[in-house]
Image: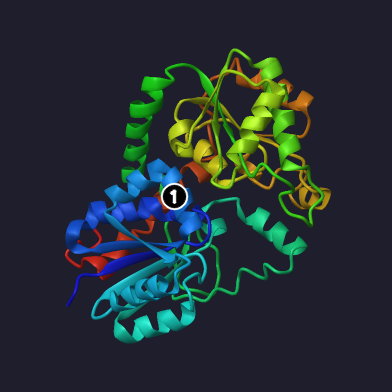
Amino acid sequence: MRKPQVLLINNTGLIVLDLLLPLLMEFRDRYGDKIDITVIIYDVKSYAYLRKNYHIMDALRIAGANIIVARTGHRLLEMISLIRVILGCVGRTTIILKASDTLPKHRWVVAIMKILGTVIDCRALSELIVPSAKIGRAACEIFDPKIGPRKQVKCDILLSAEPIGWDVQTVYVGYLKKLPVWDRFVKTSYYKEFKATIGRDYYFFVLSSTDGLRLSWLDEPDRYELLCETLTALNKFLPELHAVLRPHPVSNIESVRKAIKETGFTNYTISYAHPSVISMGARFFISNCFSTACLDAWRMGVPIIDYYRYDSRLEKLCGGWSVGGELVDYYVKSPEGLLNVIEEDMLYYAKSYKRSAKQADLYYYFQKLNNWRYWDDILDKDKKGV
């Protein structure tokens, strides 16, 4: 019988891959060449995003992952790739890791795969892997009926950070970016790149989409105008403190450069390094709207400032706070408020923040529930949960 494989199916963007990549690295470290790992990227646009995120590419190499692009724009090549994925399941056990059904003809393909081999369909929802993201997703469901109820999960296994009580067999994985292999990778990458090159005090400003509105049905500020507003405030107050600007894959870099020129922003570096790597040496973190990058910074003990003006209905649902909930230390909505927080709390206090015991211990869900027993039983019975 062929050795088992882990098949990670990414949707548009890189969120699912970014969330589950530490698990792939841990699999490779634990099982070595006893397993195959394949990552399926949604389309060529997502692959271009991936190529920009060089730390994710490095981590995939460490995980020994093969990469397949599902949608290339060439029907024949797409068909060949799909057949390759299907035949890859013949006579072996396959663990599918996914957030949604994103393969072409996904359910048909998985049904055929289950005929040809043993397939365990695992679904990881971002709000289950990322603590406190649940409220943001729930809020979006209220205002956008197209999203639909997320509780209608079609899968064999659900991956979650902590117990949730859904009527689906669940494997609790804790917060994956606390896993040892990923943690070592982040530290090594930081000392190679940031400690050696920047070598001085800096703060981390993560950029999002820079054009238009975040969601058309929400009453929120124009992204480009908010970016200019933020840069103006920071430049006025912190011209001497270095900024690391980290574009999102969907950020229009030309719009970013235009905003920098318009506002006269100085003393900065634009970096596509992984948010966890940048966060290791950052004094504080700023975002224009909560994102998974906030969680990367939060884990590193960096104070989180969410500078945004959410739709009043959404804000009310979140108790007058950011959709990031307890992962956000400061929610500010004006340039004056931003500068006040930085002056009073960021510049003269210790860099590292103490987090709640519940959040800091999420990694230990993995050990407490001994989830290696579950994976070992599928991928390498010789391990026996050790």
Residue 356 lies, with reference to residue 353, above or below; the image says below
Count of numbered circles in the view: 1
Residue type highlighted by circle 1: Leu
* Residue 289: percent from left, percent from top: 67, 42
Question: At 33% from the left edge and 28% from the top edge, which residue is drawn?
Answer: 192
Is residue 287 positioned above or below 43 on the image? Answer: above
Given residues 20 and 79, the one toward you in this image is: 79
Q: Quadrant of the C terminus?
A: bottom left
Whole-percent x and y of residue 328?
Answer: 63, 39
Q: Position of residue 148 (x, y in %)?
A: 67, 70
Colouring chosen for the image of the structure:
rainbow
- Res. 161 visible in picture: no
User: Which residue, given by chain and number where applicable, does mark 1 sit on?
Assistant: 50
**Which residue is situated farthest in the top direction here?**
240
* Along the viewing direction, whichever of 164 and 100 lies nearer the viewer: 100
Tell me if residue 266 can be seen: yes
Q: Relative to residue 313, is residue 190 depicted above or below?
A: above
Residue 171 falls in which quadrant of the image?
Answer: bottom left
Mark 1 surroundings within 10 Å by alpha-carbon count, few (fewer than 14), some (14 through 19), many (20 or more) = some
- Disc 1 is placed on an element classified as helix
Q: Is residue 341 left or right of residue 103?
A: right
Which residue is the extreme one toward the bottom?
115
- The image quadrant where one finds the N terminus is bottom left
Please determine whether, in this image, residue 103 is positioned above or below residue 351. below
Residue 315, position in %: x, y?
Answer: 77, 47
Residue at 40% x, 76% y: name it.
Answer: 79
Q: For residue 210, what is the image quadrant?
A: top right
> Residue at the spot x=58%, y=38% of the render?
253
